[in-house]
Amino acid sequence: MREKIILEIQAQLLDFYMVCPPNIGINWSCPMDIGIRAANMLMAYNLLMLLDKENTISETFKSTFAEMIASHGEYLYAHLEYGDSITSNHYLANITGLLYIAIFLEKNDQTNTWLKLAMQEINRENDKQFFEEGSNFEGSDS
């Protein structure tokens, strides 16, 4: 049963990457969606690693997954939905996705830049977008 789950998660992740290559198509049109997707994919990958007690996941898959996540980070960094006068849940999703990506990927100048930016901006946006009681300036309490 565990092996079937591992294979299915890998198949779903690889299928997306093959059918929706980076920067092409509707799945690469909204940076907020890309940030959310990257965070979800990383959570799925983490689950995959926890399930893999027999170390059956190949280095090829791990490398391909890292490439996939790096392409999400490159896109997000180049397309941050930031505005001088107002930012929103879109920008928050951008920088949160970038934070997840920067923590996951191998450390280098690029990922260190992403990590520093994401940490700085998440703190700033939390102060800017959320009131003390937890509601958001957009009118949402979630």
Image (cartoon, grey):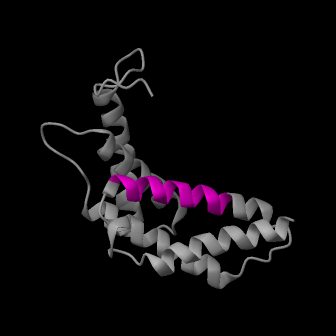
Residue 58 x %, y %:
71, 81
Q: Residue furthest left?
A: 85
* Residue sitting at x 43%, y 75%: 20
Residue 90 x %, y %:
31, 45
In the rendered view of the protein, which quadrant contains the C terminus?
A: top left
Q: Nearer the viewer, residue 124 or 7?
A: 7
Above or below residue 73? Residue 93 is above
Above or below residue 46? Residue 68 is below
Principal SS element in the magenta part?
Answer: helix
Residues shaded magenta: 32-46
Q: Is residue 36 magenta?
A: yes
Q: How many marks?
A: 0
Classify residue 103 as left or right of residue 62: left
Q: Residue furthest top?
A: 133
Classify residue 41 as left or right of residue 87: right
Q: Nearer the viewer, residue 86 or 16?
A: 16
Q: Nearer the viewer, residue 90 or 110?
A: 90
Q: Nearer the viewer, residue 142 or 128?
A: 142
Residue 115 x %, y %:
41, 55
Residue 138 x %, y %:
29, 28
* Residue sitting at x 39%, y 45%: 119
* Residue sitting at x 32%, y 57%: 31
In the rendered view of the protein, which quadrant contains the N terminus?
A: bottom right
Classify residue 109 as left or right of residue 69: left
Q: Is residue 82 magenta?
A: no
* Residue sitting at x 63%, y 59%: 44
Classify residue 24 as left or right of residue 81: right
